[in-house]
Image: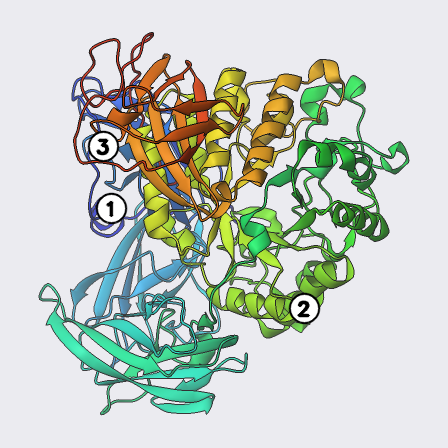
Amino acid sequence: MNRLSLLFLSILLLLSTFMPTLAQPAAAQWSGDDGGYESVVLRGSVAPLKWDGNDNPLFFDQEEGVWISEPINLPGGQKVEYKFVYDGEWMSGDNLEFTTPQAGTYQFVFHPEDERHVEVRPATEYDGELTLRVELPEGTPDWVVPTVASNMNNFNYSVTRMSKVEDGLYSITLKGPAEDELKYRYGLGDSNYQETRAERRTAVFTVEGNVVEDTVEAWTGIPIANNVSHSFNHSPFIPSENDDVTINVEVEHNGPITDGGIYYTIDGVSPKGARGEAEVGQVAELNIVSTKERNNEGYVSIFEGTIPAQTNETPVKYKVDVWDKDGEGSQFADTNSLDSVGATEFAYYVDEFQSPDWAKDAVIYHIFVDRFKDGNPNNNYDTVDVEDVGLEEALKDWMGGDLEGIIEKIDYLNELGVNTLYLSPVFEGPYSHGYHPIDFLNVDKNFGSIELLQELIDKAHARDMKVIYDMVPNHSSDESAFFQDALDNGKESPYYDWYTFYEDGSYETFYGVESLPQLNNDNPETREYMLEEVIPFWLEEVNFDGYRLDYAKGPSYSFWVDFRHAVKQLDKDYYIFGEIWDNRDKINSYSGKLDGALDFGFHDTFKGTFAKGGSMKNVSNLVKENATSYHPEYIMSSFLDNHDVPRFLYEAGNDTDKLKLASFTQFTLPGSPMIYYGTEVGMSQSENHNEYSDWKDRWYREMMPWNEENQDLDVFAHYQEIIALRAEYSALRTGTFEEVFVNDDVLVFERVDNDSRLLVIVNKGAEQTFDLAKLYHQDRLTNVRLENALTQEKKTTKKGTIEITTEANGFNIFEISGKLTKGENEESVGRGNGKAPETPVGKGKGHEKAAKTPVLNGQ
């Protein structure tokens, strides 16, 4: 078998098809002479790209005025999500996207004056050439562009587009190593519309340039429209039983499209229908509300329909198609399938959306089980000896932490004050992190047993602690019996459709990792297994109180609607929150399906502000944007570090004052705060993760130091204090947030509920003295009292104000009594160094450069 060849599309085709400039480009701080930055690195989703580290730096090209990466070898036909990181800061906005037209090397280009411009250049030259010329069958619409799916682009039917020679005749010239064989089929831009041919075509690259004349006899289907898009565009997004739900669909088309239908069910089964007739479920009309011409290349029509209101706790599933009343067939959104079997199943959950009250009060302690405590050396079956292999190698393997170790330290956690434990996966699997499940219904022998896990949960419950399990519904290990059966027996296996296999024998994976085949949770049998066996087992039999859901954006929204229904039918008090490493819109799209999500924006902003010296205004923006983006019942879990990101303290130069300031702010702002094991005793990293090209995260997952000589007990006491503070004042958990003042170094805000009104001051700069009257823009104050919530020291008004001194890198929190209102005047609020009114006056160092607020970390 010939080695994998590499296609090389013509530069014109690449430029016209694969280099779109995304809308709303963000202006960067840029200078044409030096690129505006000291460093720019590339991070992304497809190996060898990664979402961490600096393995792919760019260099500045003086002549072009752009930053360019070294050639990077990528597979063909893959959608690559990527972002640039400049001077250590993530570029703002969504991930950029590019689909590789063929396997080969590419150079990514960063335009500092237009940072959202997508430009990816082919970087390989070949000595062979192949021209394909194909004649299309009669009846092929002239607006459809044929494509070539091949072994060079992973048989992707959308990426390699041909050029029109004349009516019915198309051509493309590809380049690759001479004498290599191309295996290919023709399509019409989608695998739904491919030529009806049992065997793949073959052709050979030659130095002279081989020309092949082909004829397509027929297609498996012909598209009715260019694109039918719904993309879960329904309103209201989280409906209750009084709400009719409006469905909006956009159709790009050349020929006539006159009608549409919505096929929906309310009993959990998948709907089926076409051209206005429902086979399974009910049907609602979809009608045209507008049609506009599309750049002289056809039309865009907007359709709208309504699904009637349903009772609470109803999972509504629906599919959508459009058609021409005088034609044949129909086309479904968003897969553009010609039948409902292959159509996207949309879904929403009807309910009065409410997350569990206990989860709003939760202080979560995140335990990476293998690294927390070795409670039983007798179960160290796969543990390596650090003294034999060295820490660097040992951290790649099992280190001995187990369930008995957590049981042994349950009173330590109780003493710390946390009320919720979150355990990393303990599934049977090949790796210590647990994210490669072989058996979804068992505990790996290195961790212990189901019985020990139940004992741990019982002991936690006896101390009024909840326990959350890290569930992995997106993928299994390739060692799973299900996957091995599918691999060995192909379509004869009952588990073949539990995964997604492709024409070339490859399969859908989690981020290109071959050892992690992705589960097809839209397959009814897979979904039934996950929701009726796996999910209730850990909740009902093992007795967990909820799930943290790994890579929640992997399974479909339809899966999460069924998931919510399955969980909440067991007990509404179970808490389900997701790992959705993306922008706010994407994270928020899971509200009403999940109870909450990890706040990756919080992590990025706090690291940039407190560890790296950025502006406190970024924290202010974060809180305000969260408040306007997320449903009030959607709980955002804040964290400074976790198993996937570097230790905060290490990033802060091991400055515990920065950690204390950041954690105090975390515990006084809205959200459910999370502590990663060891952070509470000043745990950092032994090595710089950036100096490693693989297994970087090993340094985020070192063993918990249990010898008090290796713990910072002052930091531990600090965490005890802020946990107790949050427990004492419900306003810090569920109260309103109102900003009083912010500048680069200082954030002043209130948290208020019916029980208390708290004033919080966070100062990461020099010592500051505040005039409370001026802080609230009042001429003078009367009968206002402050009581320090940490020291119980009381302050009353003197000469019409109260002076508050906050030390450098310090914080205050006061309970307010009396009448304190905010006026409209804009005045200086401090004294001592004559700064502009925006800056509260203090003494000491000047303000550092503000950092941009990264919206998205990228993974």
> Where is mark 3, residue-wise?
111
Q: Secondary structure at mark 2?
A: helix
Q: Nearer the viewer, residue 174 or 775?
A: 775
**Residue 303 spot, x, y in % from top left:** 24, 77
Asked if the residue at tag 1 contacts the one at tag 2, i.e. Cβ–Cβ closer than 8 Å, the answer is no
Q: Earlier in the sequence, mark 2 or mark 1?
A: 1
Label 3: few (<14), some (14–19) or many (≥20) C-alpha neighbours in 10 Å: many
Instruction: Tell me the kind of residue under disc 3.
Output: His
- The spot of residue 72 in percent (x, y) is 41, 34
From the viewer's perspective, is the residue at label 3 or at label 2 nearer? Answer: 2
Residue at the spot x=24%, y=72% of the render? 251
Q: Is residue 142 above or below residue 70?
A: below
Q: Which quadrant would residue 765 be assigned to in this image?
A: top left
Residue to which mark 2 is pinned? 529
Label 2 is placed on what type of residue?
Tyr
The disc label shown at residue 19, or none: 1
639 and 255: which is toward the camera: 639
- What separation in Å lies between label 1 and label 3 (alpha carbons)? 13 Å
- What whole-number distance in Å separates the C-alpha atoms at marks 2 and 1? 42 Å
Looking at the image, which residue is at 27% across and 22% down? 60
Q: Give residue 388's position: percent from left, percent from top.
A: 80, 19
Disc 1 residue crowd, few under 14, some 14–19, many 20+, Cα 10 Å? some
Of helix, strand and loop, which one carries label 3?
Answer: loop
Residue drawn at the location 91% of the way across and 35% of the way down: 378
